[in-house]
Image: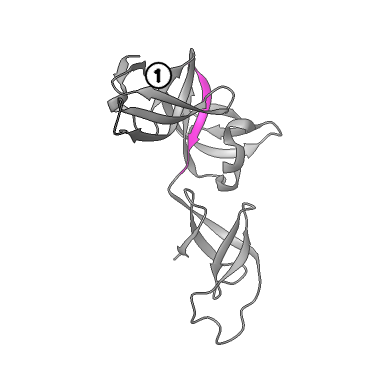
Amino acid sequence: MGMISTAQFKKGIYLLFHEEPHLVMDITFVSPGKGSAFYRTKLKNLYTGRVVEYTYKSGEKVEEVLVETQEAEYSYFDGNNYVFIEPRTFEQYSVPSEIIAEDKIYLKEGLLYRIKFYEDKPVGITLPKSIACVVVETENSIKGDTATSAMKNAILDTGAKVLVPLFIKNGEEILISTESGAYLSRKN
């Protein structure tokens, strides 16, 4: 762990805040006409998941936290934890449901995810940019209604609810963005 200046802050880095590791979720540089510049940050506690806002003075030094990453396939949910398996060594990692939270709708068996560890405890996961899902429930479109850019609701095999174009039918495989939760395209 080393000290970094506020000028090196960016989304996604980890730092020590009140003696606990935090993820920088958002950062805004503010340079008022009078007075000194500062950085307004949103920090997520890696232990509790609580998000706090904190303002750092420009040039302030903060201790950076090193977080290890392991790639593993999602396997199953055991009621309290999401279990991932490292495909080469078959080592299992149990990630508490509080860490996954609403991202559970992007977990699919057999897909690779990056699990983040701090002091050998899982503290987060990185999702792939997009995932393929099967449409399990959506309304049928009326013939001739598919040429517009209108959208309709659909429920996917992961439980996610997404807006899809009118031409998408039940049973079709589509790609959705894990960042926005939006429909991207049909899966070829």
Q: Residue 104 falls in which quadrant of the image?
A: top right
Quadrant in which the C terminus is drawn: bottom left
Left or right: 129 in relation to 32: right
| Image coords of residue 103 (percent x, y) | 57, 42
Left or right position of 141 against 26: right
Q: Quadrant of the N terminus?
A: top left
Q: Is residue 119 in the magenta section?
A: yes
Magenta portion: prevailing SS class = strand
Residue named by callout 1: 65
The local secondary structure at tag 1 comes to loop
- The residue lying toward the viewer, choosing from 86 and 158, is 158
Rendered residue at 43%/48% (across/down):
129
Instruction: Tell me the magenta residue range.
Output: 118-127
Q: Position of residue 155 (x, y in %)?
A: 64, 60
Task: Name which residue type carries label 1.
Answer: Val
Answer whether residue 121 is magenta in the image.
yes
At a point 56% along the width and 83% down the height, the residue shown is 145
In the rendered image, the vertical position of residue 15 relative to residue 182, given as above or below: above
Left or right: where does residue 129 sit relative to residue 35? Answer: right
Percent from the top left, x then y, of residue 19?
48, 12
Q: Quadrant of residue 153?
A: bottom right
